Amino acid sequence: MLRFFSKYRKFFLVMALLSAVIVYLFYTALKPKPVLPVYQPNMVNAELVDQDLQYKRKYHAIAPFTLVNQNGDTITQDDYNGKIYVADFFFTTCPTICPIMTDHMVQIQERIMDDPDVLLLSHTVTPEIDSVPQLKEYALKKGVNDAKWNLVTGPKKHIYELARKSYLAAKNAGDGGPFDMIHTENFVLVDKEKRIRGFYDGTKAEDIEKLMEDLEVLKSEYEQD
């Protein structure tokens, strides 16, 4: 018996290796691909959702917008057609969470620089302060690449409605009045259909890594189409 196994040892080793490869291939083929959720208002913390939308269960998408970026160019939803993007809300004079968030956005920018399918979009929540020249100065200071990242300003009411009713990112229920103030750490991952696919704490390094992992999952969804 020992002589038999010794004689055919190479054969059994090859068969064992081949079996392992076949099992792995079957496992890989049958294992479901990870897919990100498509967030609807009823899936999100009610504090972050306008009361008119809290029970909406489908078809939620980012509403059309018209804003102005750091170069004085008009930016609309058309500039993000066919793109995945990460959105946030900040202001240039913020001394607390915004510098951390911006630094993390810079890191994301560096990692998507050569990816034509991914862009960034940062909305100021103090448009009365963050004029185009102010945004431009901030962009130059932080190393913003104009081709990848728009810092936008515009009517306060419009921006606040986007934060509350489109991005589901702000607890404040204000409508953009003179005393309203949004202060949110949320980064929002938006797909090519303008749907929300993820929320992340922009002040936490581990959330940024999760965002980058989810970005790859989202990109793989389009590669399968």
Image (cartoon, rainbow, N blue to C red):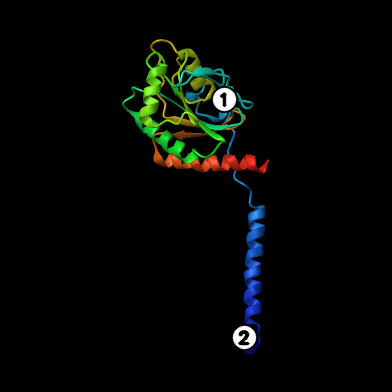
Report the side of 65 relative to 138 (left or right): right
> Residue 23: which disc?
none
Q: Which residue is mark 1?
A: 79
* C-alpha separation, residue under disc 1 versus residue under disc 2: 68 Å
| Disc 2, SS | helix
Task: Residue 6: give its label.
Answer: 2
Q: Residue 182's image quarter?
A: top left
* Residue 18, percent from left and from top: 65, 69
Instruction: Locate residue 106: give its quadrant.
Output: top left
Label 2 Cα crowd, 10 Å radius (few <14 / some 14-19 / many 20+): few
Judge whether residue 190 can be spotted in this image.
no
Identify the image quadrant of the N terminus: bottom right
Q: Is residue 165 left or right of residue 222?
A: left
Please tell me which residue is depicted at 52% across the width and 25% down the height of the picture: 167
Horizontal and vertical percent position of residue 101: 39, 32
Q: Indicate the quadrant containing the C terminus: top left, top right, bottom left or bottom right.
A: top right
Closer to the camera in the image, 136 or 39: 136
Q: Amino acid at mark 1?
A: Asp
Q: Where is residue 133 shown, x and y percent of the image? A: 39, 18
Give the percent coordinates (x, y) of residue 27: 64, 57
Residue visible at 56% across and 26% down? 41
